[in-house]
Image (tube, coloured by chain):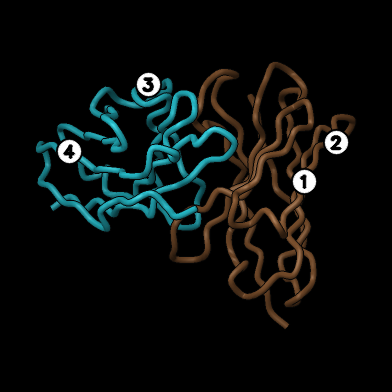
Chain colours: A cyan, B brown
Amino acid sequence: QSALTQPRSVSGSPGQSVTISCTGTSSDFSGYNSVSWYQQQHPDKAPKLIIYDVNKRPSGVPGRFSGSKSGNTASLTISGLQADDESDYYCCSNAGSYRVFGGGTKLTVL
Amino acid sequence: QLLLQESGPGLVKPSETLSLTCTVSGGSITSNNYYWAWIRQPPGKGLEWIASIYNSGTPYYSPSLRSRVTISIDTYKNQFSLKVTSVTAADTAFYYCARDIEPAARGYGYWGQGTLVTVSS
């Protein structure tokens, strides 16, 4: 299977909102509660879960992070950008019997 | 607090088998209905899902790695393991073990710190 398609990079100024898209096939999103999102601030550190089950936030994740899905495209929106949000972001789909990650998006806070 | 810790050789020769173990502490590997997973990340590249195993022992594999990968669970030791056969330099990566945040949820909320495995002669 191929990785889900994410933009290589996005950018925004502090206080602005940015949206990262994640596109796949209908098979990629065929599983239950089909999308999660991860933030990885350092390349050799474990990613952090920021959105699960399409639009749920784990305890401790600010409400500035939100997720949605329409058809075969999932989206992560970060509002009120902060300097600390500068990271790599990955989506992950539940394809039923397996999962697929996106290629990752580097967010730059200008 | 649930903790996951990967262990295994940091250097594997080409064509040999990579073997890793994830030790779970702070909770039983058989409690509730969780999928325990292996995920890897080549240095400087993106995440790749490898395999997962249900606490009942049912395995699930990435279609692209299925022919070379085996995942297993040891409920007595509270561990689960990964084997990748016939490794090449392309298998050099940080390897992470992980678990979903809640039993019916789909999102890896718990991760090990990761272990770097280098394939080189």
Image location (x, y in percent) of residue A109? 18, 50
**Lower position in the chain sequence, tag 2 or tag 1:** 2
Q: Which residue is mark 3?
A: A56
Query: What is the C-alpha distance between the residues marked 4 and 2?
Result: 44 Å
Question: Which of pointers 4 and 2 indicates the residue nearer the eye?
Answer: 2
* A9 left or right of B68 in image: left
**Residue A70 image-quadrant placement:** top left
Amino acid type at circle 1 is Ser
- The amino acid sitting under disc 4 is Leu
Q: Which mark is residue A81?
A: 4
Nearer-the-camera pick, A14 or A99: A99
Identified by mark 3, the residue type is Lys
Residue shown at 72% from the left, 38% from the top: B59
The mark closer to the camera, 4 or 3, is 3
> Circle 2: is it few (<14), some (14-19), or many (20+) Cα within 10 Å?
some
**Do tags 1 and 4 sit on the same chain?**
no
Quarter of the image where one finds residue A106? bottom left
Q: Which residue is mark 1?
A: B81
Q: Which residue is at 38% across, 49% downward?
A: A4
Q: What's the residue at 16%, 51% (across, down)?
A: A11
Mark 1 to mark 4: distance in Å? 39 Å
For the residue pair B82 and A14, the one nearer the viewer reads as B82
The answer to whether mark 2 and mark 1 are in CB contact below 8 A is yes
Instruction: Report the residue that reaches farthest toward the right.
Output: B76
Expressed as whole percent of the image width and height from the top left, the position of residue B71 reads 75, 45
